[in-house]
Amino acid sequence: MSFMKDLGVVCRMIKIEHSVFALPFAFIGAFLAAGGWPGLYNLVILTIAMVAVRSFAMAFNRFADRDVDAANPRTQDRPLVTGELTTRFTQLFLVGTAVIFIVMCGLMNPLCLKLSPLALGLSAFYSYCKRFTYWCHFVLGAVLGLAPVAGWLCVDPTFTLPAALFFCGVALWVAGFDLLYACQDADFDKEMGLWSIPARLGIPSALAISTLSHVITAALFLMAGWAAGLGGWYFLVATAVGITLMAEHQMVKPDDMSRVNVAFFTMNGVIAVVLFFGVLLDLFTA
């Protein structure tokens, strides 16, 4: 009973429902690599692997940042800070999710198995980046950018241009909305000597960099569709995604952070799912 309670707390801590950010892009990679239905086997092991590695990354971040979270009024209610969750259980959870991820990669193919430690290492490395570089937002982007590459390699263990373009697009997309989210903690990060862009360069500069990242993201999603040989339906959806990204930046102003959560969670979750359905629509109606 205690184990299940702790598991429920850790799932709440890592916001497991936010797997929606990365999972649709992993599916995009898998469906494009297969040129259609990638098979139930591939989808099941890919889904388990993606949820496991994202859970590992989020739990590691909470574990590594527990001292910072304890000092930040916005994050003082997180389970590792309040004591609702023990560090020992979190460490066991990290080991468990890492093992599940590696096993799933082994069930994909030898290349995915060989790359699995690199993915885990990059996922953990991100948590320390804010301590020494303001490129931390783009490191986080690179971690999630691996999703379409992972999906592609699960089905076809070769590196391709479409997967690389989707990697770059997702990396800049994530960096852009992480910059929006980080604006909430600009004063705190500056006081703590952390290297977020809002703390180091100011909120107006952070918002400008975020906007530029999303402009390039929109272009990269279009280029990735072209490289994958997708057609009109995908480009229509990708264009709508680009417009949505630009609308997102009308919601957050340097003097008004009240709608950051709407821009960060709601709109970006929709973007990932909608782009995936754009791929499906194009593949299965061509």
Image (spheres, rainbow, N blue to C red):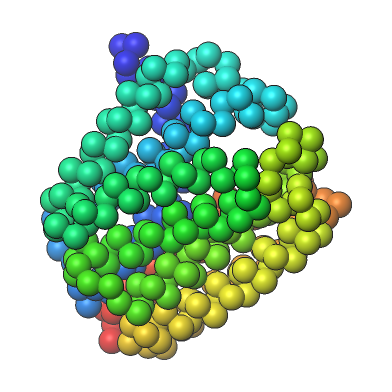
Residue 234 vs 124, above or below: the answer is below
The residue at the point 67 percent across, 71 percent down is: 212
Q: Nearer the viewer, residue 70 or 116?
A: 116
Q: Nearer the viewer, residue 279 or 154?
A: 154
Residue 75 vs 102, above or below: the answer is above
Where residue 167 sits in the image (x, y, percent)?
42, 67
The residue at the point 45 percent across, 34 percent down is: 60
- Using the rendered image of the protein, determine whether residue 262 is visible from the camera's viewpoint: no
46 left or right, relative to 143: left
110 left or right, relative to 97: left
Where residue 149 sits in the image (x, y, percent)?
33, 65
Q: Quadrant of residue 38?
A: bottom left
Q: In the current view of this chain or complex, which residue is farthest to the front?
A: 132
User: Quarter of the image containing the N terminus?
Assistant: top left
Q: How many marks?
A: 0
The residue at the point 35 percent across, 72 percent down is: 163
Where residue 57 sits in the image (x, y, percent)?
42, 41
User: Quarter of the image containing the C terminus?
Assistant: bottom left
The residue at the point 86 percent across, 52 percent down is: 255
- Using the rendered image of the protein, determine whether residue 103 is visible from the camera's viewpoint: yes
Where residue 89 sits in the image (x, y, percent)?
37, 19
Q: Nearer the viewer, residue 265 or 141?
A: 141
Residue 149 vs 232, above or below: the answer is above
Q: In the current view of this chain or complex, which residue is farthest to the top?
A: 2
